[in-house]
Image (spheres, helix red, strand yellow):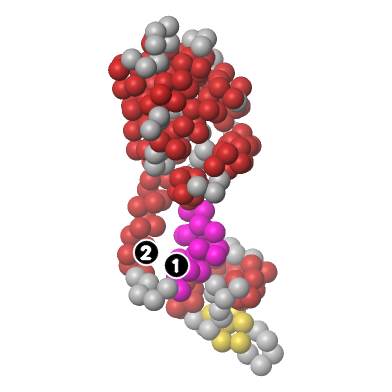
Amino acid sequence: MKSVKEVSQLSGVSVRTLHYYDEIDLLKPSMVAENGYRYYNRDAIIRLQEILLYRELDFPLKQIKELVSQDGYDKAQALKDQIQLLELKKSRLEAIISHAKALQMEEEEMSFEAFDQKTLEEFQQEAQARWGQTEAYQTFEAKGETGFPAVTKEMTEIMQAFGALRHGEASVQEAQDQVKVLQDYISEHFYPCNRTILAGLGQMYTEDNRFTSFIDQAGGTGTAAFVAKAISIYCQP
């Protein structure tokens, strides 16, 4: 058995946080002594490890509590899922790092300022204001990693392809096929991008100067407007 102080030192979780986990019934001590001191056995420490893994994946505490408390909770399967999610997170970060290094080596004039955490948070607030109560947004938000897809080499190339088409009609098959390329890329690398989510992104491409600037820089002036129009046509019922 370990005291709350020992568990705090072992895990890096503050004593105050461990007390809070107890209060909300997320992680109860294995024993509370007569003097009120909390003690944790091996099973409790393993549960804390599970909680910290979920926290690393940005799960809210309420959802973590539901997951670990549900009947038939499979620790082995949960760990397998956590590992897979962490590997996906790692792959995404590695891709972004590789792209940043490529920009550095090639000395491209590409700013990441519009895509810092503040910008992503602002975008999520704007998106939620538009369709925050829809099932689509709940799926989008549950992924938790990003609002607008990161500036990757592939995303830049997708916008460049749109730029090559921007002087034509957004309704032509080639433009519509390119929208499908964009949708599939977002779904594969970031979050499920159904037509509701895609339509919301299309609006942001012209309504938010941060995104318009990036897209027009990649594909040429007018590309953002062209992409937004092509997406609007693509998403029509």
Q: Is residue 67 above or below residue 118?
A: below
Which of disc 2 and disc 1 is earlier in sequence? 1
Is residue 205 in sight in this rendering? yes
Between residue 166 and residue 6, name the one nearer to us. Answer: 166
Q: Is residue 33 left or right of residue 56?
A: right
- Please tell me whether mark 2 sits on a helix, a strand or a loop: helix
Is 78 covered by the magenta stretch?
no
Quadrant in which residue 33 is drawn: bottom right
Q: Residue at x 37, y 64 (%)?
A: 78
Q: Please rate how many residues cluster around mark 1, counting C-alpha atoms within 10 Å: few if below 14, some from 14 to 19, many from 20.
A: some
Give coordinates of residue 228: x percent, y percent: 48, 22
> In the rendered image, which residue does mark 2 sit on?
78
Span shown in magenta: 50-69
- Please tell me whether mark 1 sits on a helix, a strand or a loop: helix
**Tag shown at residue 26:** none
- Estimate the spatial distance between the alpha carbons at disc 1 and disc 2, rounded to whole Å: 9 Å
Residue that extends furthest to the bottom in the rendered view of this protein: 34
Q: Nearer the viewer, mark 1 or mark 2?
A: 1
The amino acid pointed to by label 2 is Ala
> In the rendered image, which residue does mark 1 sit on?
67
Q: Is residue 5 above or below residue 171?
A: below
Question: Disc 1 vs disc 2: Cβ atoms closer than 8 Å?
Answer: yes
Is residue 155 in sight in this rendering? no
Q: Residue at x 62, y 82 (%)?
A: 38
Give coordinates of residue 114: x percent, y percent: 60, 27
Q: Residue at x 59, y 79 (%)?
A: 3
Q: Please rate how many residues cluster around mark 2, counting C-alpha atoms within 10 Å: few if below 14, some from 14 to 19, many from 20.
A: some
Give coordinates of residue 216: x percent, y percent: 51, 15
The amino acid pointed to by label 1 is Leu
Between residue 107 and residue 86, name the one nearer to us. Answer: 86
